[in-house]
Image: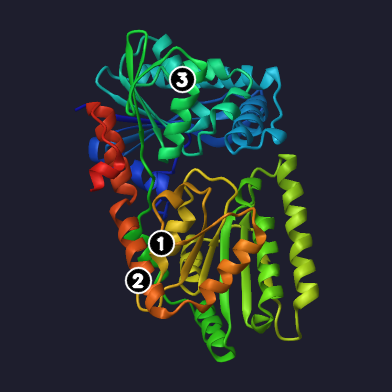
Amino acid sequence: MGRLVVISNRTANLGKNTQIGGLAVGIVDALKAQGGLWAGWDGSVVGAEETATTKIQTHGNVTSLTAPLTTEEHEKYYLGFANKVLWPAFHYRLDLMDYRMEFVDCYSATNAKFAEMVSPHLRDDDVIWVHDYHLIPMAAELRKRGHKNRIGFFLHIPFPSADIFSAVPRHEWLRYCLLQFDLIGFQTINDVHNFHRYLKEHSDAAIISPELVRVNDRTIHIGHFPIGIDVKQFAKVSARTDDTIELERMRRTVLKRFQVISADRLDYSKGLPHRMKAFRKFLEICPEYQGHADYLQIASPSREDVTAYSDIKAELEQLAGAVNGRFADFNWAPVQYINRNIPREKLAPLFRASLIGLVTPLRDGMNLVAKEYIAAQDNKDPGILILSKFAGAAEELSEALIVNPYDISEVAHALKTAVTMPLEERQLRHRKLLKRVIDRDAQWWQREYLHALQHGDHHSANERVA
């Protein structure tokens, strides 16, 4: 078995002993198990006149290969085609798509640049795993350079309906690039169905089976692989005592208060204003909880150079002020809004201390916050997860309160249901949810995907779990 080569837009710092998220946990474990190479952008941006130096660092049996982006690449490849065209389109927001020819040209050229960086370091028996919408052309670029390795692609965000994807300029080229991979992995069954329908309506690809597509003389495997988290690590962090959080928990107990928590990147796909409006509606229909319900909205900054993000930030700040202005009392403000990054070691105990986890994106590939909230709970007195039916996690987490995030009244009534739910029902729901999150953790995800990539005999995730 050859090395594993991972290519992603960003890489983790393998030299730092820090806690890392779900994607990186699975990848790092796989790289250390097989030995390998992790290549991508180093996070820095340099001017055109500066030398874009490739950095090579080795940590044990894993090598990282990184390079900066130029200012033009950052503007046109990353902020441009990736995040002003693909991101909004794949999240069903064609109205926010800003397509320009120079964006797609730079997107193609930057992928070629990364392929050129990786190519000399590849061995014939390497297995290559490419991640996410930034790097759709990567297999095509590597094939141009003569590499016949098995190359897999995993899409972390949703794959949209056939109508939406066909509205993306250059979708035929993107389809060609996707079909240069040996395995295309999606988060959900729905994503797989969307891709199948697109191929049927917009290509001459032959759908041999739900897992196999034939194009010319090539067979491409397709599957869904729901990503997970490091459950034990997150549960361990959540159980640590924090004086500030413990004091707040005691204060709530004395005052008979409870907390609703939301924690997401500041992104229009997350439905953050809808959540705040739903909490406001909850206070209206359940006035008995005024003075007792606290809503903590953590919205970490995200792509602040894109206009749509500054707009949603302003809307959230206005909403938080309006709700507090209407309902607050001398010793109680219903909304606490935080627009900065909160470390995981702080976030996990906050999840544990919150009676309700409100995770209601308008569209999401998976949403690991939902799984983290479940992992953080106290088994004896667990909280309740309210989850959008448009989050990929809803396919797995059916014991959560599943809602339509666009229906403000429905989400408000789900908040009421959660507040009044008996302890026994909360415990039963949590046991089932926790088992599923444990069964499909980050390590399961990478094992399932790499087994399918290396052996080409992927069965559905449901079959393999069963």
- Residue 264 or residue 168, whichever sits in front: 168
The amino acid sitting under disc 3 is: Lys
Q: Separation of disc 3 and disc 1 at Cα?
A: 34 Å
Q: What is the residue that sits farthest to the left in this orientation?
A: 1
Instruction: Check residue 200 in the rendering and tell me which mark sits there, or answer none.
Output: 3
Coordinates of residue 304 in the picture (x, y in percent): 69, 44
Coordinates of residue 284 in the picture (x, y in percent): 71, 74
Q: Separation of disc 2 and disc 1 at Cα?
A: 9 Å
Identity of the residue drawn at 63% across and 16% down: 105
Q: Is residue 226 left or right of residue 79?
A: left
Q: Earlier in the sequence, mark 2 or mark 1?
A: 1
Disc 1: which residue: 399
- Residue 95 or residue 138, whichever sits in front: 95
In the image, residue 326 above or below residue 255: above
What is the crowding at mark 1: few (fewer than 14 residues within 10 Å), some, or many (at least 20)? some
Q: Quadrant of the N terminus?
A: top left
- Say whether residue 60 is visible: no
Coordinates of residue 87 in the picture (x, y in percent): 60, 35
In the image, residue 42 above or below residue 14: above
Tag 1's secondary structure?
A: loop
Tags 2 and 1 in contact by the CB under 8 Å rule?
yes
- Residue 74 or residue 357, whichever sits in front: 357
Coordinates of residue 370 in the picture (x, y in percent): 47, 57
Q: Earlier in the sequence, mark 3 or mark 1?
A: 3
- Say whether residue 42 is visible: yes
Q: How many marks?
A: 3
The amino acid sitting under disc 2 is: Leu
Identity of the residue drawn at 62% across and 24% down: 168
Disc 2: which residue: 428
Tags 3 and 1 in contact by the CB under 8 Å rule?
no
- Residue 358 or residue 164, whichever sits in front: 164
